[in-house]
Amino acid sequence: MNFEIHRYYQVDSTNVVAASFAKTGAPEGVVICAETQNGGHGRRQRVWNSPLGGLWFSMVLRPRINPRFAAQITLLTGVVVAKTLRRLYQTDKIRIKWPNDILLDDSKVAGILAEMQLDETGEIDYIIVGIGVDVAPDQREFNGALKDDIASLNFIMGKNFTCEEILAAILKDFSQVYPLWQIQGANVILPDWRTMNATLGNKIDVQDDDKIIFSGLAESITEEGGLVVRDIHGHAESFDFGEISIRRAT
Ligand code: BTN
């Protein structure tokens, strides 16, 4: 697949800009990349701080798949981002927390936000996949406030990658896995996801709007990308939404 990268100094959110491109017919592979966002957001409209020095971009995708499997795109992107960062930073400490957090040890260093639009026939019109990577965010730049809670991959790992290099590597890896996934499905990603995940085998709380709605052992991933959790009574439920928090195993 070919990418057509549109670069901006500042936008509200690259996901929003990419969606407006997609609505007016932009083809798959259009990428919106901004040096900083003033309305960057994560899941549940949470604020996503996007100072200079971080990598903030969104891709327009038009996968030819059953919408039922669309949630897998978050897992696929997580696998691609985690593998790319592992290779570049030469570490296997980068792991994926279901569904969309990329961790370095316990610090979140990247996040993924996929937003889907169906057409009038119920088929996928487009999916916007937004990726934020804390490459080397300027800790003092954001809205004039100190943001020393944002991790910096370069700083932690003692490397000096540019956002440009990370973007090119992620897009290259994505373009290899994405076409295969459309043909072969989840099997293309799940083995790598299982190897790199930080969720399965842990006791977790599933939260909805900050309320714990289910607790148990994270057991497996469904074909649709949902997380199967089994409670202490042996009852298993699958979740395709919600936040999870991982409890220390006892
Ligand atoms: C999350 O962890 O909840 C997802 C964070 C996704 C952030 C990226 S940065 C580029 C794109 N634009 C946004 O507004 N969000 C995504």
Image (cartoon, rainbow, N blue to C red):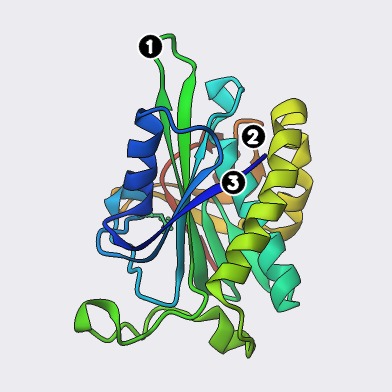
Q: Quadrant of the N terminus?
A: top right
Residue at image coords 75%, 69%: 87
Q: On the rendered structure, is 55 left or right of 17? A: right
> In the figure, 13 relative to 138: above or below?
above
Marks 1 and 2, Cα distance to the nearest angstrom? 27 Å
Density class for disc 1 (Cα within 10 Å; few <14, some 14-19, many ≥20) is few
Density class for disc 3 (Cα within 10 Å; few <14, some 14-19, many ≥20) is some
Residue designated by label 2: 222
Residue at image coords 35%, 74%: 51
Disc with the residue nearer the chain's start (3 vs 1): 3
Residue kind at label 3, given as amino acid type: Phe
Helix, strand or loop under label 2: loop
Disc with the residue nearer the chain's start (2 vs 3): 3
Q: Would you identify the image quadrant in which residue 140 lies?
A: bottom left
Q: Would you identify the image quadrant in which residue 203 lies?
A: bottom right
Residue at image coords 70%, 77%: 89
Helix, strand or loop under label 1: loop
Residue 159 percent across, percent down from the top left: 64, 86
Residue 75 percent across, percent down from the top left: 61, 46
Q: From the image, state whether disc 2 or disc 3 is nearer to you.
A: 3
Residue designated by label 1: 120
Marks 3 and 1, Cα distance to the nearest angstrom? 27 Å
Q: On the rendered structure, is 167 left or right of 140? A: right
Q: On the rendered structure, is 182 left or right of 73? A: right
Q: Which mark is on residue 207?
A: none
Residue kind at label 1, given as amino acid type: Glu
Helix, strand or loop under label 3: loop
Q: Quadrant of the C terminus?
A: bottom right
Q: Give the number of marks.
A: 3
Disc with the residue nearer the chain's start (1 vs 2): 1
Residue designated by label 3: 3
